[in-house]
Image (tube, rainbow, N blue to C red):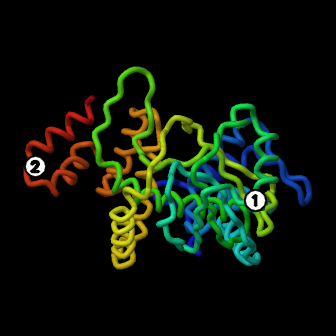
């Protein structure tokens, strides 16, 4: 597992600041001042941990590793990195546990959708909520905020995603990414229409969207740690996609894309791009969606640290009419 300091940072600076507010008391360590939270946030952003560990767990490993290193009299970037690596090894030594993610999609006529397996995650699609999850899911909804109570008015399609991982955060992130990858491929095929909105009712551009609530379960259907997520941009009136009318071409497109991803040496990077694409177009705020899509364009053109001009130059290279598209993309930036 690769764990290292990211390039472009000076670890000694943040270590020095943390050392100044550190208080040692035997084998215990504490920190004074509100600056601690700012410094720890910066420390998390400076450490690269392999993508197989979720963002939440990665942050926990950095904090736990740092606190262990801080108990020693001498605190250095190397000692912090060594302690974080030890925490990561302990995390990875844990046995895998089975988890099931339950959510819904705005689909109807799902009988043609196969049982997908994507990145170690198995998918099952249902017309109705499977009974073994009902009690746990209803309890979570009743315990949650009033906004979530009754937010899902008879979903037309439920989906479960199953995987094994070290813990709930790792499993949840893995399963949501796999589901969003599948949605990314589907929406890339279906989002081929111009959308014009009148009035104040604005819907996400994505045709296939997630339901309001995602819950995590064990093999018996019980809630796994009473963990749930919700979609802040969820809309009840999003409408449904009749998959029977679109399924043949969409499923063929899905198979073609998945085959290409397996053959392509940049397959994992393209998967990341598809996930970012679908997450961007889930937003109701089109300005925010555009900013996220532009960030994705910088990712795809490897111009994250360059200016707009270089991003546009690499983007228009694929077009025949480059001068027109250079103007088009330049106009999009200044809108």
**Circle 2 crowding by C-alpha within 10 Å: few under 14, some 14–19, many from 20:** some
Where is residue 53? Give x, y as percent: 62, 66
| SS of the residue under disc 2 | helix
Decide which of tag 1 and tag 2 comes sooner along the chain: 1
Quadrant assignment for the N terminus: bottom right
Q: Which residue is mark 1?
A: 131
Where is residue 245? Give x, y as percent: 38, 56
Question: Mark number for residue 322?
Answer: 2
Q: Is residue 230 left or right of residue 312?
A: right
In depth, the one of 290 and 250 nearer the eye is 250
Q: Give the spatial CA distance, label 1 vs label 2.
A: 56 Å
Q: What residue is shown at x 40% (from left), y 51% (from top)?
A: 277
Q: What residue is shown at x 73% (from left), y 36% (from top)?
A: 149
Q: Is residue 80 left or right of residue 292?
A: right
Q: Quadrant of residue 288?
A: top left
Where is residue 85? Give x, y as percent: 67, 71
Quadrant assignment for the C terminus: top left
**Contact (Cβ within 8 Å) of mark 1 with mark 2:** no
In depth, the one of 62 and 330 nearer the eye is 330
Where is residue 65? Give x, y as percent: 73, 62
**Circle 1 crowding by C-alpha within 10 Å: few under 14, some 14–19, many from 20:** few
Number of numbered tags placed on the structure image = 2
Q: What residue is shown at x 21% (from left), y 41% (from top)?
A: 329
The answer to whether one can see residue 118 in this image is no
Question: Mark number for residue 103?
Answer: none
């Amino acid at each position: 597992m690769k764990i290292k300091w990211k390039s472009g940072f000076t670890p000694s600076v943040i270590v020095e600041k943390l050392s100044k507010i550190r208080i040692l008391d035997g084998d215990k360590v504490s920190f004074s001042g509100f600056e601690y939270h700012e410094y720890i946030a910066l420390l998390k952003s400076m450490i690269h941990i392999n993508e197989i560990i979720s963002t939440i767990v990665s942050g926990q490993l950095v904090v736990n590793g740092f606190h262990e290193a801080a108990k020693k009299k001498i605190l250095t970037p190397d000692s912090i990195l060594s302690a974080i690596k030890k925490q990561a090894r302990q995390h990875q030594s844990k046995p895998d546990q089975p988890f099931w993610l339950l959510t819904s999609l705005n689909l109807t006529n799902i009988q043609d959708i196969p049982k997908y397996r994507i990145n170690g995650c198995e998918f099952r699609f249902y017309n109705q909520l499977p009974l073994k999850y009902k009690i746990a899911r209803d309890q979570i909804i009743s315990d949650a905020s009033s906004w979530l109570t009754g937010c899902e008015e008879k979903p037309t399609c439920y989906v479960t995603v199953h995987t094994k991982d070290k813990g709930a955060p790792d499993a949840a992130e893995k399963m949501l990414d796999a589901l969003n990858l599948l949605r990314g491929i589907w929406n890339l095929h279906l989002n081929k229409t111009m959308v014009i909105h009148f009035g104040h009712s604005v819907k996400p551009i994505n045709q296939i969207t997630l339901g309001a609530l995602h819950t995590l379960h064990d093999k018996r259907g019980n809630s796994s740690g009473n963990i749930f997520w919700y979609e802040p941009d969820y809309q009840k009136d999003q409408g449904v996609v009749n998959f029977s009318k679109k399924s043949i071409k969409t499923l063929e497109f899905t198979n073609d894309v998945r085959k290409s991803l397996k053959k392509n040496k940049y397959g994992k990077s393209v998967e990341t791009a598809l996930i970012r694409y679908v997450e961007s177009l889930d937003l109701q705020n089109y300005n925010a969606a555009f900013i996220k899509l532009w960030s994705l364009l910088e990712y795809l053109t490897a111009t994250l640290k360059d200016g707009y001009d270089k991003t546009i130059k690499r983007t228009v290279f694929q077009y025949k009419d480059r001068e027109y598209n250079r103007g088009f993309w330049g106009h999009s930036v200044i809108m």
